[in-house]
Image (cartoon, grey):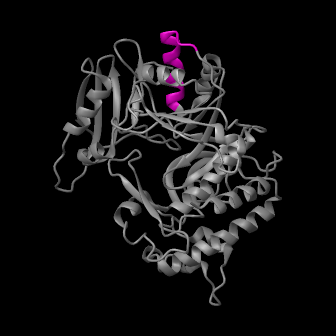
Amino acid sequence: MYEAEQRAEFDLLMESQFWPIDRIVDLQRQRLEKLLRHTRADVPFYAKRLDVLFRADGEIDWSRWRELPIVKREDLRNHRRALLARRVPEGHEDIADISTSGSTGRPATTSHSHLALELTKASVFRANMNDKVDFSRPLGAWAGERANEAPWPDGRRGGRWGPWWDETAAAGETFTLTHVAPAAQALEFLSRHEVRYALMGGTDARLLAYEAQRLGTRFSLDGIFTRGTDPTELGTQLVAEVFGARTLPLYSSKEGHRIAHRCPDCGRWHVNDEQVIVEILDDDNTPVAPGKSGRVVVTPLWSYAQPLIRYEQGDFATRGEPGLCRRRLSSIDAIVGRVRHMFLLPDGSRIVPTLTPAAVIALNAEMFQVAQVSRDVVEVRYIPLSNGRMVNLQPAEDELTAQLGRALTTSFRPVPSFDVPPGRKHIEFLSELDLN
């Protein structure tokens, strides 16, 4: 489904990355105008919110873009129904919900059409093509938070993972193992299936390399696609040393879709300008200068089911200097604060812990942080919500015990606040041990 639309989008993206900046902006505004008119007419939350943009004759005054109020994460939670479109354009009727907890204790849900997801996947294929990825080779994914889906040792076997129109991709296979499986099992699984590419979180890639060193496991990979957290310079170097692999990161979010990819030529992150508007703003909501860091505000251009016009997603980034690459897409020098720490287990192995949205909801917290404070103690810190609901610590304790084992003790401590330095992101899983 949506094959023709995805192929057309891919063909456009392969060409448009080399367009002059003015032409890219023209395309961006064409797409944005359609989204804005739909949003104003069919999404109750924006009924008056966008009026400042529209002149009396109905035309859009682009000079007033920055006067639009920024949508916050709490808006997603507090105005869920009002943010949903009453009607969607043809092709966007097939809609799914995605929930994310982020660094707060109150998960937020966004709705996306399957067409939007397929169109934005075209930007992933563009990044893959730029990186000269071989779609005929097997791909192993270490992902998913449900223990009963793709469990070790069998996992789940699937078909091609490359573009449907690429003849070489027909030979490609996928092998998926739940992320709940420990790193040692992930290594065995990937090695057994002789995968050449792997897909996982940025911190997971670093973790896997450490575990391979610890166990003396040896096998080669062509590349590791990373998502979510930053693989870091150390992780990129470690992955190259241990697996001989390139680290191929993608900057994305559940709310903003596929946002940017690392350029193989200049090394910067190139924003998918044709599909998302990215603003990097200071505390006064003014765009920062190149080389400066600020808050990331996104407007995904294919989000017709639940439009997010100027949505602050909680990330910080450093704006890149324009015009330094043959690809004319806007650039990001660094994505700041997308960090998740590894924890150290008694046997010397490492793990990247997680909590399901259900466990986070049960905490009934404004924000939370899971911290390894010593070799045998993990502390869950949380800011309680004053909403009269009961706090249930048991789901979080059960999930952490299942991941970390009973040799580590889990304690809980309510706190009044978290100290997050300016320009940084709250770290939800923190090791206070020296683990590099």
Q: Is residue 206 magenta?
A: yes
Type of secondary structure dominating the magenta stretch: helix
Above-or-below relation of 268 to 109: above
Q: Quadrant of residue 60?
A: bottom right
- The N terminus, quarter of image: bottom right
Please provide percent x and percent y for residue 27.
73, 67
Q: Is residue 51 visible?
A: yes
On the rendered structure, is 101 left or right of 27? left
Residue drawn 43% across the image and 74% down it:
45
Above-or-below relation of 230 to 59: above
Q: Quadrant of residue 79?
A: bottom left
Residue drawn 55% across the image and 70% down it:
91
User: Most extreme residue toward the bottom, as rendered?
Assistant: 57
Q: Is residue 332 visible?
A: no
Q: Is residue 395 magenta?
A: no
In depth, the one of 55 and 92 nearer the eye is 92
Q: How many marks?
A: 0
In depth, the one of 227 and 192 nearer the eye is 192
Please provide percent x and percent y for residue 62.
67, 73
Residue drawn 25% across the image and 51% down it:
385
Please provide percent x and percent y for residue 8.
71, 61
Please provide percent x and percent y for residue 87.
47, 77
Above-or-below relation of 83 to 331: below
Residue drawn 45% across the image and 73% down it:
85
In depth, the one of 204 and 78 nearer the eye is 204
Q: Quadrant of residue 236?
A: top right
In depth, the one of 352 and 245 nearer the eye is 245
On the rendered structure, is 193 left or right of 156? right
Q: Which residues are drawn in magenta?
A: 203-218
